[in-house]
């Protein structure tokens, strides 16, 4: 049994407008309701963050994420977004190191092996206790039909869902798979 709570994030990439985001959120809240067993994160394009921030204030069933962040606090960095700007919009999570790294830098999608390696590196830098607490997400082609099998792996603590998260009902199926795995792990 793991002490790490599953985390499921919808990474919309460059999809859905702020108007579409509101409709998506309405469907998501109606379908999934309040989920305590897993953390649900919605990561829209920057233009949809304010619309979702407003929606999340009314229905705290999920948290808000951003697709990128610049490390400087402010300055002449055209097109960049700072941590302070994101915090002002109630953004709690940021995706750093996008899937494009596979294409540009030759990184692979090898699910459990990569997560175990990451956890071992963390353990070597700090200790086993810290490594056991770090949540590591899988980010390669998570879909409703493979989510449960992926989330049952011991070092996969969640999923960063791309294209499959664009359909709110499909994303709800993935969330439900994560809840089922979390409940299963609690009874071991």
Image (cartoon, rainbow, N blue to C red):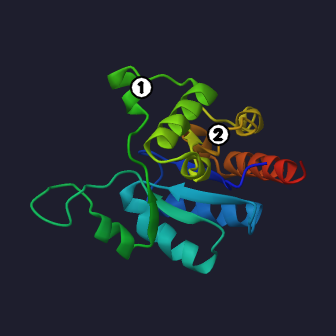
Q: Position of residue 100 (x, y in %)?
A: 38, 31
- Residue drawn at point x = 63 percent, y = 47 percent: 167
Disc 2 on helix, strand or loop?
Answer: loop
Horizontally, residue 174 falls left or right of residue 129, namely right
Of the numbered discs 2 and 1, the one sitting upstream in the chain is: 1
Residue lying at the far left of the rendered structure: 76
Task: Between label 2 and label 1, give the one nearer the viewer.
Answer: 2
Residue denoted by label 1:
102
Residue lying at the far top of the rendered structure: 106
Question: Which of 185/14 is in front?
Answer: 185
- Residue drawn at point x = 54 percent, y = 57 percent: 42
Q: Is residue 22 visible?
A: no
105 vs 130: above or below: above
Residue 17 figure quarter = bottom left
**Residue 156 - label:** 2
Disc 1 on helix, strand or loop?
Answer: helix
């Amino acid at each position: 049994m793991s002490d790490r709570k599953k985390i499921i994030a919808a990474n919309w990439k460059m999809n859905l407008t702020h108007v579409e985001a509101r409709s998506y959120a309405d469907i998501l809240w109606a379908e999934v309701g309040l989920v305590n067993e897993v953390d649900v994160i919605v990561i829209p394009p920057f233009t949809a963050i304010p619309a979702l921030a407003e929606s999340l204030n009314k229905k705290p069933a999920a948290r808000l994420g951003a697709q990128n962040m610049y490390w400087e606090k402010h300055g002449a960095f055209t097109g960049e977004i700072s941590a302070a700007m994101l915090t002002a919009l109630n953004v709690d999570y940021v995706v750093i190191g996008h899937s494009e790294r596979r294409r540009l830098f030759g990184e692979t999608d090898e699910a459990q092996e990569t997560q175990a390696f990451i956890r071992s590196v963390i353990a070597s830098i700090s200790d086993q206790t810290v490594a056991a607490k770090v949540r590591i997400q899988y980010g390669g082609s998570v879909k409703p039909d493979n989510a449960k099998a992926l989330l049952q792996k011991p070092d996969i603590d969640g999923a960063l869902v791309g294209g499959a998260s664009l359909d709110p009902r499909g994303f709800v199926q993935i969330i439900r798979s994560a809840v089922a795995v979390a409940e299963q792990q609690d009874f071991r």
